Image (tube, rainbow, N blue to C red):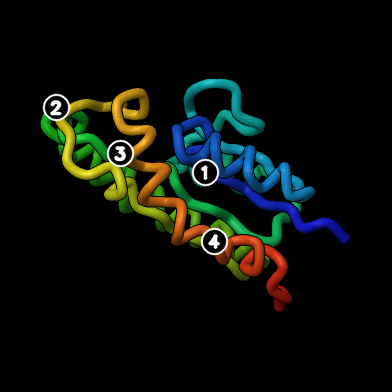
Amino acid sequence: MTKKFLITGGEGFIGRNLKYFISNMGYEVKSLDIEGNPDYKISITDFNSLMSISEDFDAVFHLAATTAPPQFDDDPLYGFHNNADGTLNILEFAKRKNIHRVIIASSSVYGNSNSISIENDVVSIIMCKLKYPYLGFNEFLHFKWK
């Protein structure tokens, strides 16, 4: 049986590339985001909408977050609410849907930036930083899930 994964923040730079990478390995991947063209256009802060997702998943890659300093400077309470409550919602969603793996990543691989989106400026730096940590990713996906 093919494993199925959900990526929150799936329309962001890392989310899009992770989805591409995992789907090219033959796995089914769905994305969740509030922007772009995700499979689920749902905010991680909207718990009822999260719970309306009826598909089963083997794991969730939780990448959705308020990350850039300008976003926090403009509205720090929104940033806190989105990150803290949103992550709690994803963890509770996984618990209630019997998803045993939630992988949480940080955008700190980008380094410090005053820009909200820096993907066009640092692609080569990011790919260099990500190259070696993901060498074991194939083994991770083939790991026997409980």
Task: Report whether 26 appears left or right of 8.
Answer: right
On the image, numbered disc 3 is attached to which residue? 66
Amino acid marked by disc 2? Asp
* Secondary structure under the numbered disc 4 in the rendered image: helix
Q: CA distance from mark 2 to mark 3?
A: 12 Å
Closer to the N terminus: mark 4 or mark 2? Answer: 2
**Position in image of residue 19 (x %, y %):** 61, 41
Pointer 2 local density, CA inside 10 Å: few below 14, some 14–19, many at least 20: few
Single out the mark in the foreground, 1 or 4. Answer: 4
Task: Report whether 27 appears left or right of 5.
Answer: right
**Position in image of residue 68 (x %, y %):** 23, 35
**Quarter assignment of residue 76:** top left
Q: CA distance from mark 4 to mark 3?
A: 28 Å
User: Which residue: 61% across, 38% down?
Assistant: 31
Closer to the N terminus: mark 2 or mark 3? Answer: 3
User: Which residue: 59% across, 22% down?
Assistant: 37
Task: Report whether 135 appears left or right of 78.
Answer: right
**Position in image of residue 62 (x %, y %):** 48, 51
On the image, numbered disc 2 is attached to which residue? 74
On the image, numbered disc 1 is attached to which residue? 8
Position of the N terminus, as image quadrant, is bottom right
Q: Is residue 6 visible?
A: yes
Residue 117 vertical placement versus 134 (above, below): above
Amino acid marked by disc 4? Leu
Residue 98 vertical placement versus 38 (above, below): below
Q: Are marks 2 and 3 in contact (CB under 8 Å)?
A: no
On the image, numbered disc 4 is attached to which residue? 135
Q: CA distance from mark 3 to mark 1?
A: 12 Å
